[in-house]
Amino acid sequence: MKKSALQKARAAYQPKLPIVLTGAVKAVEGNPTESVADQAEIKKLFPNTYGLPELKFEKNTNPVPGAALNVGVILSGGQAPGGHNVISGLFDGIKKIHKDSRLYGFLMGPGGFVDHKYVELTSAIIDEYRNTGGFDIIGSGRTKLETKEQFDKGLEILKELKIKALVIIGGDDSNTNAAILAEYYKSINAGVQVIGCPKTIDGDLKNGLIETSFGFDTATKVYSEVIGNIQRDCNSAKKYWHFIKLMGRSASHIALECALQTQPNVCIISEEVEAKNLTLQDVVNNIADIVAARAAKGDNYGTVLIPEGLIEFIPAVKKLIAELNDFLAHNAEEFAQVENKRQYIIEHISKENAEIYASLPEGVARQLTLDRDPHGNVQVSLIETEKLLGEMVGRRLAEMKEEGKYEGKFATLYHFFGYEGRCADPSNFDADYCYALGFNAACLINAGVTGYMSSVRNLTNPSVQWVAGGIPVTMMMNMERRHGEMKPVIQKALVRLDGAPFRKFASKRDEWAINTCYMYPGPIQYFGPSEVCDQPSMTLRYEQNDK
């Protein structure tokens, strides 16, 4: 494989491990845990893996020689920068336990596990992918592991390859499936451990012990570079309003982090829209007022950051989507045969939601009824919220002009930054964090536990001071409605309106709205002084300082 000059230089980068993981370790048990909500229901569903203690690794002064381990690994769900380093850390970790340990990668996600498609990951393969972006070492997929048939089929290949432990690298849904798999294998005494690793660029898989999911740092730095470039162009041409939609279906962490890095004129935080019970028109009016105020100063340009999942957080639209999800889950076949789909929906849902649905532009209404994702949710990335807002703001400004409340020009350009950030070469922070997560997962396997998520914390300190251990996945769970039924899932971590990152943003946004305070972060730096190359996200820094 031909490599660029940067790839060659990055291959030589040695990720920095927490000092505790550089020698022999022992697992120290902390307090027993319980789920974040719905404790009785979760405990009933996970009788063998509920209530386990937190684990923290400490130096072991009396190590016992380790035995060879056969381990399987799955990349599940959407790509996130650093996944290859999780695998390389896992590989190095099990080889340190015993030189004859072997690592098998299941191809194209959980589907490869069920269909027995795999490859042994040797040092030659691993070395090709160290410190690189993407998931192409073994590929990823979105097959859900949820049925006994799948679990049993997977167990066949685990037994054939003498695999003792399976590491699932994924987001909240993938780690939920990992917990269900761990519970099932424990209940039948299969002798297979299951360990999860926290991956998602959306940043919504976290708690006090999972401080951030991997990939968030790199992705937001990639998006912020491009937003900064657009703002530089904006400030040069002085004639366009750029409406920029950013990934983040279930939470606005990406939009908030990019706002802190780039200081745009407007950044909508979905969680605030929901908390204030704002309508779509309220959001539009707010943007239009800022456009008019800047125009009064002669500034007919600006930037608006929009979380991809905004439409689901507008309370009235959220109720509509919830009913649509349930309705389409139970009437999918009939709906597929109907010619006038819009009218069919209007006639079959509640009067209140039918009125909202009928008021939506044709394109948005159609997008709300498109195929659901594997979890039964509307695919909000297909809804062009940036264009919807831009067009509605244009209409509102035309009204304001007639009322004599606006003098100016309003020209729009639209962007959606999603895939651009998912497979970038990881920042030094993500390269180190991911390598540590994988190496730490090997230590959890050696400790003999199952149903745990790899946890590396204290992340705003130098990486040698990071704290390593594990938390039971059931600790992060609650019950939610999926496909019309209540299911156990990892609770999404939303932007906290009382949290330090949002408070910092809220204290500055009025100034950023009217004045041009743009920041231009530039591209990710891999080489140079630590203050340029190794800094974690601003979100993480504000959160840790607040503690």
Image (cartoon, rainbow, N blue to C red):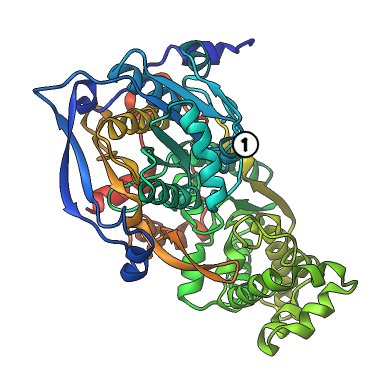
Side (left or right) of 476 relative to 287: left
Residue 191 in the image: above or below residue 508: above
Rendered location of residue 59, percent (x, y): 14, 27
In the depicted view, which residue is nearer to us: 97 or 385? Answer: 97
- Crowdedness near tag 1: few (<14), some (14–19) or many (≥20) residues, C-alpha within 10 Å: some
Q: Secondary structure at mark 1?
A: loop
Rendered location of residue 143, percent (x, y): 61, 46
- The residue at which mark 1 appears reads as 115
Residue projecting furthest to the right: 339
Rendered location of residue 215, percent (x, y): 47, 38
- Tell me the residue at 29%/25% (across/down): 17
* Amino acid found under the numbered disc labelled 1: Asp
- Numbered label tally: 1
- Tell me the residue at 70%/62% (across/down): 390
Residue projecting furthest to the left: 61
Name the quarter where the N terminus is drawn. top right
In the depicted view, which residue is nearer to us: 391 or 344? Answer: 344
Residue 478 in the image: above or below residue 192: below
Residue 449 in the image: above or below residue 9: below
